[in-house]
Structures are given as C-alpha cells and as structure tokens.
C-alpha cells in the first residue's frame, strides 16, 4: 500500500469509544492532512473531526433485524408453499393417474362390459377422492382468509350421528373394525348449530380413527352434555377414541398444524394431505370450542372436542323451524338426497338452455340432465346463449344454465344482456350459474348481475336438480 499522502487529503475511520459514563458510542473520525508529501509515519500536522453516529447505526441495526425477520418469515412461508405444492401434486396425481389409466383400460376393452364396469367404479371412487381433496384445500384457504360464516340452524344430535355412522360404516366394515357411536347424558338432543360444519368435524376425527387403526381395531364416539348453569346453553363433549397406531410424543404438538403428517412409514402409505385436523381446529375455534388430543404410540388416541351450543328447550322450536320432515331425526337435511322426486312435473320434460364452452363438460351436463327427463339445448358461449334465448318462443325454456368463464361473452355479461332484452320472460327466466369457481364471492357476483342461483362444478346432480326445481317452481307460481 502506498502510504504517501497529499495536503488536503482525508481518511475516515469508524470506531467505538467508551465514554466516561461507561456508554459505547460509535464515531466516524475524519483525518485531513495539511502538510506536504510525507509518509504516514512522518506526517507533521493533520486535523480530525469526530461525528457521533451511534443513533444512525442503531437504527440501521433495527432495520437490518426487521428485514431479516421478514426474510425468514417469507422463507418459512415459501418452504410451506413448496411442501404444500409437492404434497398436493403427489396427492392429486395419484387419483388422477387412476382416472386416466382406468379410462385407457376401458377404451381397450369396449366389448367387455364387466371390465368396463370395474374401470368405471374405480374412476368414480378416484374422482370422489379428488373432489374431496380440492374441497379440503378450498376449505382451508377460505377458513384461513376468514371467509367462512357459520350457518346456524336447528340440529338433532341423534340424527346427525346417524348420518355420520352411515358415512363411516363402509370404511369400518372394510377394515372389520368395532365401531360405536353413543349419546350419553344428553338431555337436549336438539341444538342450534352449523350442522354441516359439526358433521365435518366429527367425520374428520372418525376418518382418522378408522384410517390410523389397523384391521379389527376399536373406534368409538361418545357425545355427552355437560352441566351448564345457563338453561339456554350447554357444553357438549365429543370424544373420539381409537386403539390404533397412536401418535408419538414428538409429533403430538403438530397434529393440528396444516400439512403436518407424522413421519412414519405407516402414515406415508396412507392417503392424506395433513389438512383434516387443521380444518377441524379452525372450525371448532369458530364455534367457540376447543379440541385436544391425548395419545400413546402403539396404543391409540383420544380426541376431545368441547363446544357450547344453544339448546332448543322445547321440541316445538325444532319442528317449527324446519322446512322439511323432521321425523327422520336428521334435522330434515337428508330430504333432498332421499327424495325420489327427480321426475316430478316441475322438471320432467322441461327444456333448458345450457351455455358451456368446454366440450366434455357440455356433454356431461347434457347427458346427466337427459337422464332426469330434462331436454337440453346446448350452446358454446354467452353470445350464442343470448341470441338463442332471444329467438326462442316465449316460455320455451324453463331455465338457463350458464357457465361463467366462456370465450366471446362470459356468463355474467350474457346474463346482463338477457335481463335487458325486451321480452316478458327476460326478467323472470331462472338463470343458474354453473361454474368451477366455488368461492362465496363468485356466488355474490352471480346474483349481482341477475342470476338466481349458483351451482359449483363438478356437477352434483342432487344439488342441480334441487336448484332447478326450486326456481322453476317459483317461476310457475
Ligand atoms: P387428511 O388431510 O386427508 O385428513 P391426514 O389424515 O394425514 O390427511 P390430519 O387429519 O390433519 O391429516 O392428521 C394429521 C396427522 O396426525 C396424521 O397424518 C397422523 O400422523 C396424525 N393423526 C391424526 N389422527 C390420528 C389418529 N387417530 N391416530 C394416529 N395418528 C393420527
Ligand atoms: Mg385426516
């Protein structure tokens, strides 16, 4: 290094000094040389200026720490996203693979009906699985973004457990497990709750108990009503016990974390995303309740959900509030699935206009509706729907089923255009959104442009028929 300096040249140094009262200060010292060309050692005169930069440095340190924390948070979130995507991609690919493979096998065996039937059964169960996976992920993101509202209605606990038992039975039978659901000390069977969400909580607990308990094991769900000083509210406890593989002490605190699954070859063999318990905990929290778990590896697990519910003190409240038959004891909820009214006058022989751009989806909708006696005229975008409806004779169509995302003109624009047509039935024809966008905000948007209702794809026929029947019925009244 060349140490020779010129007059006027400065050198700055940063250093720490301890003040007389023991504090550490950070200073920058600037040395300026005033005499001629000398070596560093031989400098005769210079002056120095010291500036206290302690505050700036402290602020910089705080900013650095904040940035680092933000970076670490982003890194963790990113890692969670990556884990999620790889788990999802695996979990989606597995059933998808079955759908594609079975389709190919069926195509190669067109003259063997038994083989085709077998393939179709497998395609059907894999698609069910895919749908529940998609629903779980949607549910989780909806819950996390606070978009879920509780729908409170009168519920009969015995009816609810009957439904849950029916849903579990095929799985339990397959694994030859001993399965029991009981109501113990339940004074008020009729409560005010979100029945769908409560059923989802119980199903998530029971499906785990069944899944993580070997063949021949024992599973039970006990529901009890705890004493409450408030005559209108009771604390209910739902205890799900199994004698399955159990959970290690190390994993126990993570059971309710999203996407967490025990690192165990027995677990990884089984299908799952690790979302069931995270969803359960979120729902229970929304119900102002708690969920806890006790478990011993190799021995079994006990999950306890405790939630306060308003009770229906008089049974009349329960019967009065229900729209459907309540003697089924299931809160009237099964009526839509049990009804054999799919061929009622309301919809049988009626004609609907369907706008759907995707060829396969169009074909599926047409075939399914035909099976229920509904005549369908299908078009491929919103503009064609408007033109076809405009040219049709009054009252020719009983309803319009409208996809949302379509080329040329989307479903929202088409609905607005139809509602503005100058013909008498333009304002009254039921327009139902058929869409793969399953969020509540989409339903709100559909209504705001003049659609009557909203049905999510993939189409569940029960729901579509129920909606068609409802709106066609209102139209004819
Ligand atoms: P899915 O999202 O399909 O429910 P999953 O069952 O793996 O997937 P969770 O229900 O959230 O996810 O459960 C998280 C983890 O907790 C499971 O992977 C398993 O390791 C453990 N676990 C939950 N319930 C039980 C149980 N009854 N017995 C043993 N382990 C359990
Ligand atoms: Mg689960």
Image (cartoon, rainbow, N blue to C red):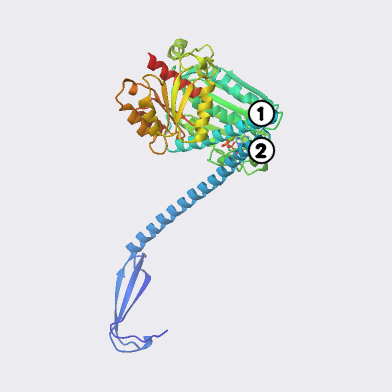
Disc ID at residue 117: 1
Quadrant in the picture for the C terminus:
top left
Which sits in the foreground, 397 or 332? 397
Please name the residue that numbered disc 2 is placed on.
297
Task: Check disc 1 and report its element: helix, strand or loop.
Answer: helix
Q: Is residue 148 left or right of residue 111?
A: left
Count of picture labels: 2
Question: Label 1 vs label 2: CA separation?
Answer: 41 Å
Q: Quadrant of residue 286?
A: top left
Q: Dot 1: few (<14), some (14–19), or many (≥20) neighbours within 10 Å?
A: few
Which sits in the foreground, 244 or 374? 374
Ligand 2 quarter of the rendering: top right
Task: Check disc 2 and report its element: helix, strand or loop.
Answer: loop
Task: For residue 300, say whether it is visible.
Answer: yes
**Where is residue 45 drawn, in percent x and y?**
29, 85
Q: Dot 2: few (<14), some (14–19), or many (≥20) neighbours within 10 Å?
A: some
**Where is residue 35 drawn, in percent x and y?**
29, 87
| Above or below for 412 versus 223 | below
**Where is residue 473 drawn, in percent x and y?**
41, 16
Q: Residue at x 56, y 27 (%)?
A: 202
Task: For residue 243, say whether it is visible.
Answer: no
Q: Quadrant of residue 301?
A: top right
| Above or below for 407 versus 452 | below
Q: Is residue 259 left or right of residue 410?
A: right
Quadrant in the picture for the N terminus:
bottom left
Which sits in the foreground, 144 or 340? 340
Q: Residue at x 53, y 28 (%)?
A: 200
| Above or below for 236 versus 104 | above
Point out the tag, 1 or 2, that comes first from the N-terminus. Answer: 1
């Amino acid at each position: 290094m060349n140490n020779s300096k010129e007059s006027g040249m400065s050198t700055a140094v940063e250093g720490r000094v301890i003040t007389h009262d023991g504090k550490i200060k950070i200073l920058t010292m600037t040395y300026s040389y005033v005499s001629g060309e000398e070596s560093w050692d031989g400098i005769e005169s210079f002056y120095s200026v010291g500036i206290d930069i302690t505050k700036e440095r402290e602020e910089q340190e705080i900013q650095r720490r904040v940035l680092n924390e933000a970076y670490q948070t982003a890194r963790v979130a990113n890692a969670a996203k990556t884990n999620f995507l790889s788990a999802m991609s695996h979990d989606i690919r597995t059933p998808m693979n079955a759908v594609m493979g079975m389709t190919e096998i069926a195509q190669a065996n067109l003259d063997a009906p038994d083989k085709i039937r077998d393939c179709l059964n497998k395609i059907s169960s894999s698609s069910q699985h895919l749908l529940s996976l998609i629903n779980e992920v949607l549910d989780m993101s909806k819950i996390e973004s606070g978009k879920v509202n509780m729908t409170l209605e009168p519920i009969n606990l015995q009816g609810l457990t009957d439904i849950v038992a029916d849903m579990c039975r095929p799985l339990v039978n397959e694994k030859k497990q001993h399965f029991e659901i009981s109501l113990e000390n339940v004074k008020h069977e009729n409560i005010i709750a979100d029945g769908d969400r409560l059923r989802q909580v119980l199903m998530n607990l029971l499906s785990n108990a069944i899944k993580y308990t070997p063949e021949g094991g024992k599973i039970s769900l006990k529901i009890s009503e705890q004493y409450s000083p408030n005559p209108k509210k009771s604390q209910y406890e739902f205890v799900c016990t199994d004698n399955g593989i159990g959970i290690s002490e190390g994993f126990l605190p993570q059971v309710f974390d999203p996407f967490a699954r025990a690192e165990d070859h027995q677990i990884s063999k089984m299908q799952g995303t690790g979302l069931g318990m995270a969803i359960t905990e979120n729902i229970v929290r929304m119900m102002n309740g708690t969920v806890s778990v006790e478990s011993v590896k190799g021995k079994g697990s006990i999950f306890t959900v405790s939630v306060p519910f308003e009770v229906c003190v008089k049974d009349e409240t329960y019967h009065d509030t229900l729209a459907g038959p309540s003697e089924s004891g299931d809160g009237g909820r099964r009526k839509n699935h049990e009804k054999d009214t799919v061929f009622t006058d309301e919809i049988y022989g009626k004609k609907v206009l369907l706008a759907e751009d995707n060829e396969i989806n169009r074909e599926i909708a047409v075939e399914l509706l035909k099976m229920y006696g509904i005549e369908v005229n299908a078009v491929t975008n919103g503009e064609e729907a408007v033109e076809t409806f405009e040219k049709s004779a009054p009252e020719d169509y009983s309803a319009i089923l409208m996809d949302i995302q379509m080329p040329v003109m989307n479903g929202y624009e088409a609905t607005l255009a139809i509602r503005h047509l100058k013909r008498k039935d333009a304002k009254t024809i039921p327009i139902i959104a058929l869409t793969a966008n399953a969020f509540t905000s989409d339903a709100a948007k559909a209504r705001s442009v003049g659609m009557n209702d909203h049905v999510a794809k993939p189409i569940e026929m029960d729901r579509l028929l129920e909606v068609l029947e409802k709106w066609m019925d209102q139209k004819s009244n």
